[in-house]
Image: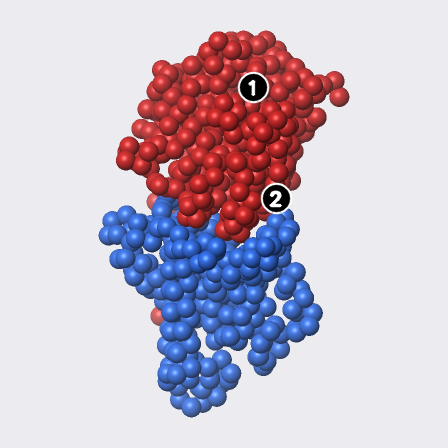
Amino acid sequence: MELVFILEQLTNGLLVGVYYLLIALGLSLIFSLGGIVNLAHGGFYAIGAYVMVTVADRLGYPAAFVISPIAVALIGIVVERVFFRKFYRLDPALGLLLTFGIAMVIEQVLRMVFGATPRPFSIPEFLRGQVFVGDFIYSRYRLAILGVAVAAVAGLWYLLQRTPFGRIVRAGIQDPDMVGALGISLKPYLTAVAALGIGLAGLAGGIMAPITGVHPAMGNEILIAAFVVVVIGGLGSFWGVVLAALLVGAVRGLTVYFFPPAAEASMYLLMFLVLLLRPRGLFGERIARLE
Amino acid sequence: MSHRFQRPDRRQIIKGVGAAALAAGIAKPHIVRAQSDTVRFGHLTPLTGFLGPLGEYAQMGVQLAVEEINAGGGVNGKQIELLMEDSVNPATASTKAERYIERDNVACIVGEISSASGLAISQVADRNKVLFVNTGCNSDALRGANCNRYMFHVEACNSQYVKGVGRNFLRNGLIDGKKIYFLTADYAYGHDLSRVGKNYVTENNGEVAWEDLVPTDATDFSGYILKIRQARPDLIISNLAGNQITNFVKQYAEYGLDFPYGGFGFDTGVAWGAGKGNFGGEWPVIWHHLLDTPGTKAFVEAFTAKYGKPPENQAWGDYVATKILAQAMNETGSTETDALLEFLEGQKELDILKGRPGYFRDWDHQLIQEMYTMTAKPLDEVQDEWDLMVLGAPVPAADEDLTVIAPTREENACSFAS
């Protein structure tokens, strides 16, 4: 009997891991190619949520679902061109300071424009309700999120593994100098990757808006979890991040079941254990220029 | 082309001197005015973190009050000069309170929401013998074990919240002989609320059969909701705080469970953040903008005109506290701490915009006042994003003494001698 409930927490935890995944993938991608540890990623997540709420109030949910990640990706392009570009080959600490600053600016601007009080927003009518699988209960909306996340991950994988674009990005991650020597400028690829990663954060913010409080600091809440996922998965590893996100979700679910006060701390413990055994994370690759 | 040394022409010199004179002119009266023509109020409240949304309303409330007092002639013929800062956390709150008193020479300190920061500020106030009027910290301990002579509480304590809404749960048969599930915020406020709540439930023959401590940074409640579904409690009680309540309420609606639920602690703003169709349950509230009293009507009108939205109950706390302090200063003709303390301890009836006036109890400095409860409004009657609740009758009822929901001397031993 008990086992059923544990299993239920486990599957629910995997679903929770999917949200971390969407944010962690973008974070990992931007870091791998440009070497920028994007502390503003949570800020873009928050912008995604606010664009979602604002657009959905006027044009309806489906339009907002399409517009919000695109709008955030466009902001990402601007931020990459104006700021990130200048920091690619420098000491990572500088990029860290830069993005930390951007994160604070985003939070304060959101606070100035929308106020600190959470913005009301609900699940759209057609996605409300629950799905029962045997004795398990799932929220219909969360299953829809799962669908979106799987599509996003599959699309990203295809883009990186099966297209010329992806080949150049992967080559750029391994050896940017050699790519340059071949006469290929990485600049447009860096811009595209930043837009993609930041757009994913925007998408995550938009789809989380109906089930969490939409407030200016919401990005901070999720950013740390996303970093932990990237570190556990291993820098530069696509499947490492996927596996780590699901693992963090599952461990969190089990901790909530057995010892709730440690729910948020469980992922740090997991990170500690993983790094103890595998200092580069689960599937971490050797990135020469960072070691 | 050779570089030529340019002498500043006469016009530039005049401009420079003018600017300097102007700067000095602005700076000088500022210093003079601060010492004689104004009374300084120091305001502290968290603007960031999970209590930030409430802090924003606190600042709006105190600003409006100061504006109105100044328009009406100020206190003792002097204008109030309002200083506001983000209290951030207990350590920073304590430093800033110290600076208000030592550098800015404030007449009093108003504000705070976090019970932990409130304790830190009260210790500074006590050491320096300056009044601190707490507008948002609920922990009973601040009125009991940690009470001090220089701290007054406009915010109701946890006992008042618990007993206020608890009577309704009791009347609806949800406590006596029932098994109850507690979700508790894992910090000082949550622990204190849980302690007071457990006492109430046990005294009324109920049982707190399950309790989960929820980290303050938790945003996903699905795991807790599944545990609740497994436990099948008769009642779910939220001892959560700030954004936690928004997230829990939203996700509880998402999973569609039908166990009755409610909370022992609450702020209207977090329910507004949940949005239409998500808010449910029964909750205690210290004040609500739809209260039908002349004072409330005037306050809501002025607030809405200034900020474009109705005030949240936290705005009420800071507004009323400031008005009470101004009243004390005007009626005593003084800004000295001792005179104000004597006035506030005099148990004088104060207009707090509610049906019945309130007063500060002299032995623990708690504002003794009416509380209210509220439930969700049926969806088809909801007018706008601030119209999600139906306000219940005042607690205690009109024929009861206001102290019946306040902690007793046994529950909250407070001694000012220490």
- Name the element at disc 2: strand
Among the chains pictured, the one given blue colouring is: A
Quarter of the C terminus of chain B within the rendering: top right
Chain designation of label 2 = B
Name the disc covering residue B213, or none. 2
Task: Please report, as a chain letter, where disc 1 is located.
Answer: B
Identified at 42% across, 14% down, the residue is B355
Task: Specify the amino acid type for callout 2.
Answer: Leu
Give the residue at x 32% y 63%: A70
Residue located farthest toward the bottom when viewing the structure as drawn: A182
Disc 1 packing (10 Å; few <14; some 14–19; many ≥20)? many
Mark identifier at residue B405: 1
- What label does residue B235 carry, if any? none
**Looking at the image, which is closer to me, A139 or B111?**
A139
Locate the N terminus of chain B and report the quarter of the image it occupies: bottom left
User: Tag 2: Cα neighbours inside 10 Å, few (<14), some, or many (≥20)?
Assistant: many
Left or right of A69 on screen, residue A102: right
